Amino acid sequence: MATQLVEVEFKGNRRAFFQWAGDEPPALRAAVIVTVERGEDLGRVHSTGELAEKRKAGTSHGKASPAELPRVVRLATPNEVDRAVRLRADEHAVRKAAIEFARELKLDLKISDTEWQWDRRKLTCYFTAEERVDFRELVRRLEKRFSTRVHMWHIGVRDEARRLDGIGRCGRQYCSSSWLPELRPVKSSTAKDQRLSTLNPAQISGTCGRLMCCLRHEHEFYVQQRKRFPKEGKIITTAVGEEKVVSNDIFRDQVTLRTAEGEHRTIPLAQLRSETSGVVPAEEEALAASGALLSLQRAARQVEEIEEIEEVEGEGKGERIEEVEDTEGEDEAPSADDPGAPATGEGEGAVTGEPRRRRRRGRRGGRRGRGGEPGSGPSTPPSS
């Protein structure tokens, strides 16, 4: 019996991958019972076959083999589906009770959503918080009230928007809720590459207050398309004479040029290529140059890694190496043994344990160190 990959969707647009034992995959939107960490849960089939493989490749679990994934137990019966519907209706009262307990305990957190596991062996409370919260007493009260194991899940604002869903400024459903397989950080440089103004962040931010997810998805298209055009501001020689590239329209494949006399004209990119032999590269040449550039960048990174390893090995020759905390993350990671730290989760604010440490390459001995004399080797940095 063949084993196939199936993507199953749960409440709040939460999706996971499972293995299905059967020659034919289940139908889309079919209710299935799956195995989870503690018992069983009910979800609906979101994708199968090649589409599921493609979506799985775009997540952090892309390299996991089907044998390592949990399995789909069976198709759900109508009675089991009705039981799940009753649980969804009860979750509103559960969230209301959790909010009341949090207010009584004066906890600085926001209960975004609650979710029952299908077999009622676990209750998950999704919350957002700016700082660490000691929610142990809240968990005790909830477990006493509902007689089940309660799991607090700290999520970020992006994950909160994904769970609650909504309509974006484009008039369509959130990308994170509709088709994105996994949320990833978006940098402001992606907006600059797309010629979007970063002076007003509200114009390029979503409902969650962060940069829109579509910026990252569309970034590769803009980068590849602009490689086919001449750089803006460059002076090229055409059939008219010397002209300056004013702007490029990557959607209509048009280029706006300006002569020395100030006359403007807009021509197709193909016509510009015919007028300037070798100045504007063809699409194939641009893509080939892009691949060569990536190869050079990879080789440069490998050389830097080798040089760094050699210098670290030469620590005894006067090199100073100091350990510093990696603060590149968006949120400070709480200590794993802190009883009040938020529970581990998928979101941007999820706990990742102790802060990672990296090595920073210092200066060679023989140069003037911080607070030391020339050739004195390592020295203690002055206290701030």
Image (cartoon, rainbow, N blue to C red):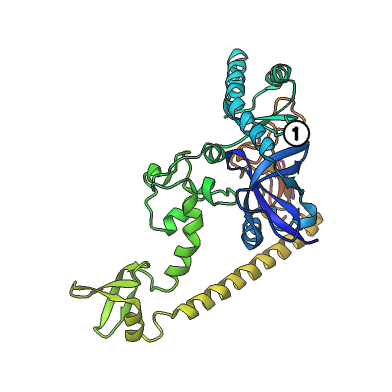
Q: Taking the image as drawn, is residue 319 in sight?
A: no
Q: For the N terminus, give its image quadrant.
A: bottom right
Q: Is residue 15 above or below residue 238?
A: above
Residue 247 position within the rendered picture, expressed as x and y whole percent measured from the top left:
31, 67
In the figure, 271 relative to 157: above or below?
below
The amino acid on which the numbered mark 1 sits, given as a three-letter code, is Ala
* Residue at numbered disc 1: 336
Q: Residue furthest top?
A: 104
Local crowd size for mark 1, using a 10 Å CA cut-off: few (<14), some (14–19), many (≥20): some
Quadrant in which the C terminus is drawn: top right
Residue 276 inside the magenta-drawn segment: no
From what the image shows, is residue 101 above or below residue 322? above
249 or 377: nearer the eye? 249
Magenta stretch bounds = 377-381
* Secondary structure beneath label 1: loop
Q: Residue at x 66, y 56 (%)?
A: 56
Q: Residue at x 44, y 53 (%)?
A: 191
- Taking depth in this image into account, of 362 and 229 the one nearest to the observer is 229
| Quadrant hosting residue 262 | bottom left
The rendered magenta stretch, by its main secondary structure, is classed as loop
